[in-house]
Amino acid sequence: MGANLTQFTQWYEQNQKELLAQAEQDKEKNKRLGAKFLIDWPLERLKSLALDEYVTGKGPQNKSFCYEIESGKYRDLYLGIRGGTAGKFGIYWSKKYHAYCDQNNQVIAENELNQQFSRLKADLVAIVTKGINAEFSDPVFQSRQSTNSFFGRSAMVTKLLCAYSATPVFSGINLNKDQKTVWGPMLSLEAQGGVYKQNYELTRLISEKYPQLDGALLSSLLWWYRNASLDVNAQEKEVVNLKAKTDFKNKYTSALLTSKNIIFHGAPGTGKSYLAKEIATDIISAGQFTDYTQLTAEQKQQIEFVQFHPSYDYTDFVEGLRPRTNADGSMGFELQDGIFKKFVGRAQKNLINSKKSKSAIEKEVSVQEMITDYFANIELGVDELTTTRGTKFYITDVDENHINVSIPENAIADKLSLSVDTIKQMLTSGRKFKQVTDVTGFFGKLNGTQSYSYDLAIFKAIKATQTSLAKPTVQPEKLKPYIFIIDEINRGEIAKIFGELFFSIDPGYRGPAGEVTTQYASLHDDHEEKFFIPENVYIVGTMNDIDRSVDTFDFAMRRRFRFIEIKAGERIEMLDSLENAAEAKQRMNALNNAIAMVEELNENYQIGAAYFLKLKTLTFDQLWTDYLEPLLQDYIHGMQDETKIMVRLAQAYDHSKVGSTDHGIEN
């Protein structure tokens, strides 16, 4: 059987802690229900069931086998089998006809009823017995020729295989559903064995890769993976639809959506920075408008703007140590995320939340409210907490990510910084943590860390103040695009700023496939934490071709970006907002034609429309003397006949003022 677990692996490792917490709860529930089920309905009992002990349709008081596993006591055992018609059980009682009916909803003749039921029981016992013994070569599992009437009732049979197996070697997923979109791509389906062998082998393969994941845990995990996969498929369709959208207002929008990373380059003043914001706005507003000021405060969080310069470095962009004042007034250093990593964090959070159910998001919001409420009602440095071993400590400071504690009784290390995320995960899990070993086991660590004792104490303190979670009203998030704009991208030392992110920003390595270990990983709360750039992040850079730093632009970055030249005349429509737009356009075109005629200059030295937007507050003469003339003089410095060249450029800009002292030019 051909197997491809890559997507599942990426999904699981990305969300492992959160997934395992909830899956463990489901496993415990299945364990309790399963034990009761085996007492009520041992496999031997199935062989001697009376008709009314089996059929559904005679009401809850009947407590029949089919009723109990669909709607009664065991409806939630291994994901359940609710839905569809009662015909899925082979025989059922019809209130409409006041008779027993078959799978086709046809009334069964009385003289045939006993024979049909005897055959049904034999088929049920046979497929369950062969299945729990993994005898998939038996004819009962031949999908094209099986005479077993239960072979096609995979939802019911899968549930029973989980319940009757001595060890959890099956997951509760009905693989008949979503076979083409989810399960088939993971593990090929074979005619001999069908979805039952596929289920068994898939559970075995995943358990070999992750020994802690048996069928009991995978019942929930694979169900969530299925939901996430279908959401991803829908999201991918949204992205495709977004890329295919033809009514975007900016002609360069589709280039960014397609290429992920683009750099606008060309002459100065061509409006490249403004263009970048226009495109970002165009995408975020779904083509409704391009004016950045029309975005809401929330939408503006999807755009970040930074300008590189020679002193800009990795600590500004990715992460680094920053000075901070401790609660006791002393100075120290703490690891802080840079602007790009913070931005990517927002995009990752949206991507993850877009895959979560409404109930999961509500639970997280409730937990956050519990934490916020607790810390708002304690007196920092005064209220005393105690670990299970009797060690007293105090919370001295709390921020978004850390809880700083003081431990006066510890002569070696009297201060400790705890992770807020650890507390959140413990509260969200719904588990009862009584000992440090419970915390250690939850996080999958062989040996606990010093912090777990204090995490446990704070967890208990929060739980003591909140006996139940509130249920806020929230709406599931939609997947959103995030655009990061880097102005003057060539003016920074690219290798120093991006570091190992050279790999991650490659459009072909977005997502977990491009994860890297950052330079300060050893200082993270989770030392094994990886960094990657999600699919919903787009990067726009701008640079002037005449900037002297262009020649040093890293070639490794060049091949990761799509370069689009913006010529001086392309953005001339920017001047339409001017009262004297026609004259401004005429002067700009004339001046640029004259620049192109200078032997040692070219189009890269032409003047963009952004310079002429200054005419909103300046006169044409002021624009020349204060901005254009100094720039042009810098261009031609060192050339032969500088004075004559400047005269020609001045004539082109305003031939009526040639020789005027307003321009500082002599005949």
Image (tube, helix red, strand yellow):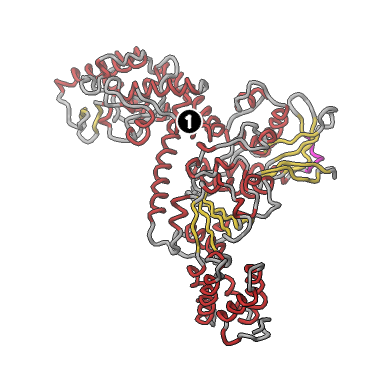
In depth, the one of 230 and 615 nearer the eye is 615
Quarter of the picture containing the C terminus is bottom right
Residue 156 in percent (x, y) is at 33, 26
Q: Which of these two is toward me, 423 or 304?
A: 304
Lateral position of residue 87 relative to residue 292, left or right: left
Residue 213 vs 329, above or below: the answer is: above
Residue type at the position of mark 1: Thr
User: Which SS does the magenta portion mostly show?
Assistant: loop
Q: Quadrant of residue 640?
A: bottom right
Question: SS of the residue at dot 1?
Answer: helix
| Residue where numbered disc 1 is placed | 9
Residue 40 belongs to the span the image colors magenta: no
Over which residues does the magenta segment extend?
Answer: 379-384
Name of the residue lying farthest toward the front: 640
* Position of residue 234 measured from the top left corner of the image (x, y, whole percent): 40, 45
* Picture residue at 53% right of the left edge, 49% below the top: 558
Q: Is residue 271 left or right of residue 395?
A: left
Identify which residue, 574 or 79, lies in the foreground: 574
Q: Does the image show residue 263?
A: yes
Examine the rendered structure and indicate whether residue 182 appears above or below residue 323: above
For the N terminus, the quadrant is top left
Judging depth in this view, the residue of 479 and 503 nearest the camera is 503
Question: What is the x, y in percent for residue 320?
Answer: 70, 43
User: Height in image: 600 above or below 239?
Assistant: below
